[in-house]
C-alpha cells in the first residue's frame, strides 16, 4: 500500500489508559496494516526498567519493529521535546521503508505534541526560582509543591502527578517567568496536524479498568518488580532521578528505605496507578479527532479489532477521496 499520498503522511495512533489493552491490539493492527510501532510511553525509553513500565517483550512483539524503547539509561533526561524530535525521525525512517508509522502509548503530552507539532519554547528561565521550589519540595514534600501549582494552574495540576516534581517545577517556573500558565500555552498551540492522523482511543468501564490495574500490579510483583528496583539502586541509580519517580519504582524505593511496609507500598502503587489512569483519561478527553472504542467486553477481541480496522479503512479512504 502506497504511503505517500497527498502532502501529509499517514500516522496511526492508539492511545488509552494503562492496563486497557493497547499492547495486544497494537500488535494485531500492526501486522494487519504493515506498521512499525513507536512507543508513546515516557518511561519505556529507559533500559533496565522493564517490569514496572510493563514494557513489551521481544516475544510479545511478534516480529513487529518497535522504536523508542530501551534507548536511554535511567540517569539520562527525556522530555516531550526530545520525544517529538526522536519520534519524528522514526516516522521519517518508517515511511522511507513504505511502512505505516504507528504510535502506541499513554503519555498524553508526548503524543499530542507529536500529532500537532507543538512548539517547545523555554519561555525564559529563573534558576533562583527553581532552586527555591526545590528547597520547598525538600522541606514540605511533593504534595505541598503540587498544591502550589494547583493554585495557579489547576488544569496542569490535574495532569501532572505530585511525584513528577521536575515538570511541576517547570510549570510553576513558566507561570512565574511568563505570567501565562502551561495549560494556557498548550491551549494556544496550533491544532492543525502535519499528519493524516487516525487517532484511536481505547476506553472501558472504570471499575473493570481498576480491577485490571490491580491484577497487572500483582503480576508485576510476581515477576520481580522489587528485585528490578533493587538492581537499579545497586547499579547506582539515585532514587531522586526522574525515572525513579515512575510508578512502581518510587513506591518500592520507599519500602526499601524503610519508610513503610511492603503491604503499604503495594497499596500506594495500586492507588496511585488508578489515579494516573484517571489523569490519562482526562488528558485524552480534551484531545480532538479521537475515535473512541469501548473494549469493556474483553472477550470480544476480534470484534474490537474489526471495529478499529473499519475506522482506519474509512479514515484513509476519505482522505484519499
Image (spheres, rainbow, N blue to C red):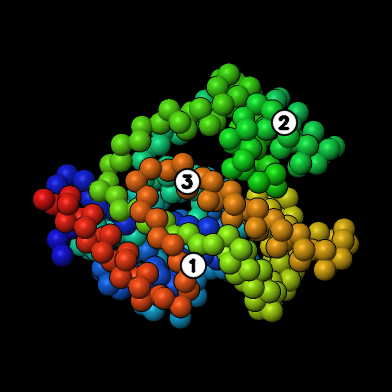
| Foreground tag (2 vs 3) | 3
Q: Viewed as shown, does residue 205 lie left or right of 9?
A: right
| Dot label at residue 161 | none
Residue neighbourhood size for the residue with mark 3, other residues' Cα within 10 Å, grouped as few (<14), some (14–19), many (≥20): few
Residue for badge 3: 285
Tell me, yes or no, if residue 250 can be seen here: yes
Asked whether disc 3 touches disc 1, contact meaning CB atoms under 8 Å apart, the reply is no
Which element carries disc 2, helix, strand or loop? helix
| Foreground tag (2 vs 1) | 1
Tell me, yes or no, if residue 124 can be seen here: no
Which element carries disc 3, helix, strand or loop? helix
Which residue is nearer to you in this view: 186 or 86? 186
Q: CA distance from mark 3 to mark 1?
A: 18 Å
Position of residue 175 measured from the top left corner of the image (x, y, whole percent): 60, 24
Which residue is nearer to you in this view: 120 or 47? 120
Residue for badge 2: 148
Assign the N terminus to one quadrant of the image.
bottom left
Position of residue 77 measured from the top left corner of the image (x, y, whole percent): 57, 48
Residue for badge 1: 296
Q: Within the image, what quadrant is residue 266 found in?
A: bottom right
Earlier-in-chain disc, 3 versus 1 = 3
The residue located at (26%, 60%) in the rendering is 312
Single out the residue that lies furthest toward the top.
179
Residue neighbourhood size for the residue with mark 2, other residues' Cα within 10 Å, grouped as few (<14), some (14–19), many (≥20): some
Residue neighbourhood size for the residue with mark 1, other residues' Cα within 10 Å, grouped as few (<14), some (14–19), many (≥20): some
Amino acid at each position: 500500500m502506497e504511503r505517500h499520498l497527498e502532502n501529509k503522511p499517514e500516522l496511526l495512533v492508539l492511545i488509552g489508559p494503562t492496563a486497557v489493552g493497547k499492547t495486544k491490539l497494537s500488535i494485531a493492527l500492526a501486522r494487519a496494516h504493515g506498521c512499525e510501532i513507536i512507543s508513546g510511553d515516557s518511561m519505556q525509553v529507559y533500559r533496565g526498567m522493564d517490569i514496572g513500565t510493563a514494557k513489551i517483550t521481544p516475544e510479545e512483539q511478534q516480529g513487529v519493529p518497535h522504536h523508542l524503547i530501551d534507548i536511554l539509561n535511567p540517569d539520562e533526561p527525556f522530555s516531550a521535546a526530545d520525544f517529538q524530535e526522536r519520534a519524528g525521525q522514526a516516522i521519517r525512517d518508517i515511511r522511507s521503508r513504505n511502512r505505516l508509522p504507528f504510535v502506541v502509548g499513554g503519555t498524553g503530552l508526548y503524543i499530542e505534541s507529536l500529532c500537532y507539532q507543538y512548539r517547545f519554547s523555554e519561555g525564559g528561565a529563573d534558576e533562583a526560582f527553581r532552586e527555591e521550589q526545590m528547597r520547598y519540595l525538600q522541606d514540605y514534600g511533593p504534595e505541598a509543591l503540587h498544591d502550589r501549582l494547583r493554585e495557579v494552574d489547576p488544569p496542569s495540576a490535574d495532569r501532572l502527578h505530585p511525584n513528577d516534581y521536575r515538570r511541576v517545577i517547570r510549570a510553576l517556573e513558566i507561570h512565574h517567568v511568563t505570567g501565562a500558565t502551561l495549560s494556557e500555552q498548550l491551549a494556544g498551540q496550533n491544532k492543525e496536524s502535519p499528519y493524516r492522523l487516525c487517532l484511536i482511543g481505547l476506553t472501558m468501564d472504570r471499575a473493570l479498568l481498576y480491577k485490571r490495574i490491580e491484577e497487572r500490579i500483582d503480576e508485576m510483583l510476581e515477576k520481580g518488580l522489587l528485585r528490578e528496583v533493587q538492581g537499579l539502586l545497586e547499579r547506582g541509580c539515585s532514587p531522586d532521578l526522574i525515572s525513579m519517580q515512575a510508578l512502581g519504582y518510587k513506591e518500592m524505593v520507599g519500602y526499601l528505605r524503610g519508610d513503610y511496609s511492603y503491604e503499604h507500598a503495594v497499596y500506594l502503587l495500586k492507588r496511585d496507578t488508578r489515579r494516573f489512569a484517571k489523569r490519562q483519561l482526562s488528558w485524552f478527553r480534551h484531545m480532538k479527532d479521537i475515535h473512541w472504542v469501548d473494549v469493556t467486553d474483553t472477550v470480544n477481541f476480534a470484534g474490537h479489532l474489526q471495529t478499529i480496522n473499519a475506522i482506519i479503512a474509512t479514515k484513509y479512504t476519505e482522505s484519499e477521496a
